[in-house]
Image: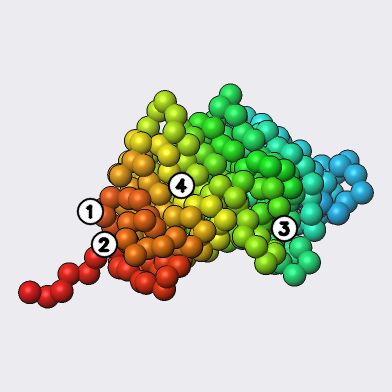
């Protein structure tokens, strides 16, 4: 009897072990498969996020790769995002997070789709910039919510007389350590409407020129039917020929603007909702701020530690510092 039990146990071990064998050519292992590949970066990302990993190299001569490694990378970011988006909905991947590594001097595409639950990470260099470069517009309609799509270390630019990003009814979109480079005609860097849980952290909004870009505003929240919740705009460097941060939506809740440095021709921050928390920001404006409130519009009862400098050289603390009684 004991011999039979031992034989059964051995068979189970053999069968279980065989199910875990992965060849060296196998890529994109999800977390629940304990096998490994010969790509250490891919394995590390899989174990961290439980998802797939894809590669994009904008300098490839065609888009014939399978995205599995740098040697076989996709040429187009749109191809990688489509693959990542499809994988999230398949094979128990809904709770996973995929990763796309992208490098390129100036990948040129116009985008109408993102990828759910995907981190898009720029690597390498775009001339003097230690970021991947992407030229084109991102007009993302409300037909699909690409929730949880995040961008890291990417330089965005577009030559059109529109916003670089126009996000309609999206959630959890994030931009971290990115750069938004305004063209001559670019009106806005990031425009969003009815989009919640957005994160814009540690980014730069500027123009490689002696004049300022973003003729309307660098960041804009458009007024629409539904309220907006949980936006964080933090630690950014912003320059704009218009308004720095412009919020037209009148119902914006649990939203924070913290620690930004803003150079704007118009107002530094203009919040029509009067519900946004404005904390520790610094802005310089071409407005005559002899009347302090000419340079900003937000609820000072939800603000703390801000400093404004107007064109006349008059600086203000916002809210006003109270002299000790």
Camera-nearest label, 2 or 3: 2
Which residue does the numbered mark 2 point to in the structure image?
A: 319
Q: For the C terminus, which image quadrant?
A: bottom left
Other residues around mark 1 within 10 Å, as few (<14) / some (14–19) / many (≥20): few
Whole-percent x and y of residue 61?
92, 49
| Residue at image location 46% in from the left, 63% down from the top | 285
Q: Residues within 10 Å of mark 3 (few under 14, many from 20)?
A: many
Mark 4 or mark 2: whose residue is earlier in sequence: 4
Q: Mark 1 to mark 3: distance in Å?
A: 41 Å
- Identify the residue at horizontal 36%, vertical 36% (top origin): 250
Work out how far the residue at label 2 is from the one at label 3, CA to CA, in angstroms: 39 Å
Q: Secondary structure at mark 3?
A: strand
SS label for mark 2: loop
Marks 2,3: beta carbons within 8 A: no
Cα distance, mark 4 to mark 3?
A: 27 Å
Q: Which residue is mark 1?
A: 301
**The residue positioned farthest toward the left in the image shown:** 325
Task: From the image, state whether disc 4 or disc 3 is nearer to you.
Answer: 4
Q: Which residue is mark 4?
A: 246
Q: Is residue 127 above or below residue 105?
A: below
Residue behind mark 3: 132
Disc 4/disc 2 C-alpha distance (Å): 19 Å
Residue 183 at least partly seen? yes
């Amino acid at each position: 009897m004991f011999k039979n039990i031992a034989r059964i146990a051995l068979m189970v071990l053999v069968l279980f072990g065989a199910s875990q064998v992965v060849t060296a050519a196998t890529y994109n292992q999800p977390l629940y498969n304990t096998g490994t590949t010969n790509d250490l970066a891919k394995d590390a990302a899989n174990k961290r996020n439980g998802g797939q990993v894809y590669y994009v190299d904008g300098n490839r001569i065609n888009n014939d790769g399978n995205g599995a490694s740098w040697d076989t990378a996709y040429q187009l970011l749109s191809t990688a995002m489509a693959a990542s988006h499809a994988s999230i909905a398949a094979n128990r991947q809904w709770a996973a997070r995929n990763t796309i590594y992208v490098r390129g001097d100036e990948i040129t595409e116009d985008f109408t789709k993102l990828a759910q639950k995907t981190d898009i990470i720029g690597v390498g260099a775009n001339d003097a910039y230690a970021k991947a470069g992407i030229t084109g517009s991102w007009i993302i309609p409300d037909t699909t919510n690409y929730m949880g799509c995040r961008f890291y270390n990417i330089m965005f630019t577009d030559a059109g007389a529109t916003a670089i990003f126009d996000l309609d009814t999206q959630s959890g979109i994030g931009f971290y350590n990115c750069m938004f480079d305004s063209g001559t005609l670019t009106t806005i860097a990031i425009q969003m409407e009815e989009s919640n849980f957005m994160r814009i952290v540690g980014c730069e909004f500027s123009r490689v020129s002696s004049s300022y870009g973003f003729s309307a505003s660098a960041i804009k929240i458009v007024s629409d039917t539904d309220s907006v919740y949980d936006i964080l705009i933090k630690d950014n460097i912003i320059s704009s020929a218009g308004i720095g941060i412009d919020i037209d939506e009148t119902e914006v809740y649990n939203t924070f603007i913290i620690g930004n440095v803003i150079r704007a021709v118009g107002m530094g921050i203009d919040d029509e909702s009067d519900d946004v928390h404005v904390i520790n920001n610094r802005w310089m404006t071409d407005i005559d701020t002899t009347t302090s409130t000419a340079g900003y519009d937000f609820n000072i009862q939800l603000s703390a530690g801000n400093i404004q400098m107007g064109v006349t050289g008059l600086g203000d603390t916002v809210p006003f510092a109270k002299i000790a009684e």
